[in-house]
Image: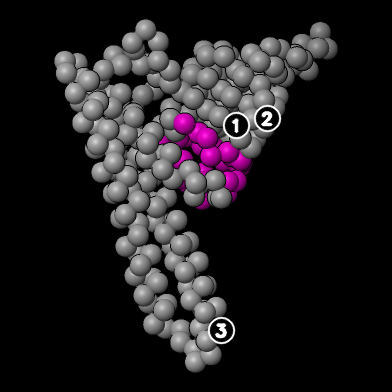
Amino acid sequence: MKGFKFVQTVGSFVVILVMILVWGVPLAPAIMFYDWMNGLILFEHEWLQALATGLTLSSSFIVYIFSLLTFSALLQFVLHVRIKEKTIVPLASFTTIRWAFCGQILRSTRPCLQHFVPSFFANTYFRVCGATIGKNTQINTFRLNDPGLIRIDDDCVIGGGAIFNAHLVERGQMIFAPIHLKTGSLLGTGATVQPGVTIEENAVIASNALVPKYRTIPAGEVWGGLPAVRIRGSSSRDES
């Protein structure tokens, strides 16, 4: 893309405007809720009024958090890069710019999102952002980068602080490679999953392990380490 440096410079200022939008719009319902509650609850006693004001402020902040998460998720739903398989684009491309904006929107909500994992609120947020998440799956992390490139099947468990990265930059190119966790797989606390990784059914990734890019972890096996290597095979292989 010709003139990409100029576009990147302008984009830096646009990001500031986007943050004003992302953080500012959800304030409207929070302010309206505060005004309504503040006019509804009135006490003559100074301490009781102070208590009521404090509870009104905290309740308004909760309204703001939910409004922020909703608005952020909807923006990412519209903007996220829709990719089903490994895709390579120039670093200087509009696809990269779209991805960068979604990443910034996602980061802007993490301080709030972290308080809702694990919960169906967080799972719903990631689904709206583009992730595919199955039934009975417990996600204990808010570090699902590139949610539109992540698929997590039924009955999976994701440990706290686990990190998903479905993108990388190599030789001036942006590479997007979906991540897939299949049914019953388990990812330990602090584990990192790189682009293009597939974790087969009932496989286990140990805590703090790093699964290198494009690796497939066979069904039922246990992997750990930095980078991750096979610690134990599936029960059927062990018995044989």
Position of 108 relative to 215 (above/below): below
Do labels 2 and 1 touch, CB within 8 Å? yes
* Residue beneath disc 1: 162
What colour-coding does the image apply? one colour
Work out how far the residue at label 3 is from the one at label 1, CA to CA, in angstroms.
Answer: 44 Å
Query: Which amino acid, mark 2?
Result: Gly
Disc 1 is placed on an element classified as: loop
Magenta-colored stretch includes residue 233: no
Residue drawn at x 53%, y 90% as measured from the top left: 45
Residue 19: x and y, percent? Answer: 32, 44
Q: What range of the chain is rendered magenta? A: 117-145
92 sits left or right of 44 in the view: left
Disc 3 is placed on an element classified as: helix
* Residue beneath disc 2: 188
Q: Residue farthest to the bottom?
A: 44
Query: Which amino acid, mark 1?
Result: Ala
Which mark is nearer the camera, 3 or 1? 3
